[in-house]
Image (tube, rainbow, N blue to C red):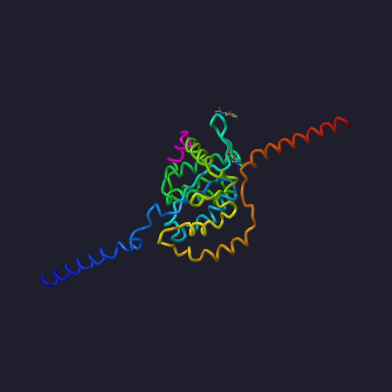
Amino acid sequence: MGSSWKMTSSLILCLSIFAFFSPSSPSRILPPSDSQKVSVGLYYESLCPYSANFIVNYLVKLFEDDLISIVDLKLVPWGNAKLRANNTFACQHGRYECLLNTVEACAIDVWPGLDGHFPFIYCVEALVLEHKYPEWESCFQKLDLDPKPIEKCYTSKYGEELELKYAAETNALQPPHKYVPWVVVDGEPLYEDYENFISYICKAYKGTNIPKSCSQVSLDTIQMVDAKPKHSVCDNESGIPNLWELLRSTVASWITRMNMAGAI
Ligand SMILES: *[C@@H]1O[C@H](CO)[C@@H](O)[C@H](O)[C@H]1NC(C)=O
Ligand SMILES: *[C@@H]1O[C@H](CO)[C@@H](O)[C@H](O)[C@H]1NC(C)=O
């Protein structure tokens, strides 16, 4: 009886000490609140090799340590696709890109948590980097995911609706995007410095749960800036007009040859 009373009273004492000290150091006990998180938006398209490279070799670093705990990450798979007047769309790298953009939009909708859709998108984009993206459906088996909700989303036209939503979000960007990957941290685009996104996240974070990886950032930044050649992007306007250019010049040289052949 006596010892249990002692235990109870020391428990009460501990709790009151805890209650006394915790308001002064809430960050040690609570995870960062959503308002403290740094918003990160990735505007991309599935077949741009630089988008794929960013997702597979850079963005994934958020999950390798505790950085994701201070980040509110949003993926927007539309990129440089163009909306036609009748609400159909054309993608920079052709129809396969429209398919994979839509499939990735469906994945975000079907598995809304990052731990659900990010591994799938990572898997598809890793195949893009290896030029094996027609094998994208192997990602369902690899990750033990059910393909049915994605199939249903894609074939029911709901996937297209999701893409139209992403088109509207991309086209509303201020300043407008010029290329992909277009990385926006705390509302500010990083332009071609996007590979240094972690140092921007660390700088933007105002909370007190500073991740360990933020302390190594300045060193990484210097090395990365020096080592990387610039202009690793897919331009906004180049894709489709370039195809037209190619077609036009092919036809022009063809006509020239026919004329020459006619002349001979
Ligand atoms: C939408 O417009 C494009 C040309 O801008 C046309 O090729 C396509 O067939 C149209 N699609 C539908 C469903 O009307
Ligand atoms: C990029 O694309 C958007 C939407 O398709 C367009 O509104 C914008 O003017 C383009 N920006 C540039 C710099 O070409």
Location of residue 15 with respect to 85 vertically, above or below:
below
Q: Residue at x 28, y 65 (%)?
A: 21
Which quadrant contains ligand 1?
A: top right
Query: In the rendered structure, which segment of residues is drawn in magenta?
Result: 149-159
Q: Nearer the viewer, residue 143 or 81?
A: 81
Residue 134, visible in the rendered structure = no
Q: Residue at x 40, y 61 (%)?
A: 208
Q: Residue at x 59, y 64 (%)?
A: 223
Q: Position of residue 144 (x, y in %)?
A: 43, 49
Left or right, 147 with reference to 81: left
Is residue 256 shown in magenta?
Answer: no
Q: Nearer the viewer, residue 101 or 151?
A: 101
Quadrant placement of the N terminus:
bottom left
Q: Nearer the viewer, residue 187 or 127?
A: 187
Q: Magenta-highlighted stretch: main secondary structure? A: helix
User: Can you tell which quarter of the image residue 81 is in?
Assistant: top right
Residue 90, visible in the rendered structure = yes
Left or right, 162 with reference to 127: left
Q: Position of residue 3 (x, y in %)?
A: 14, 72
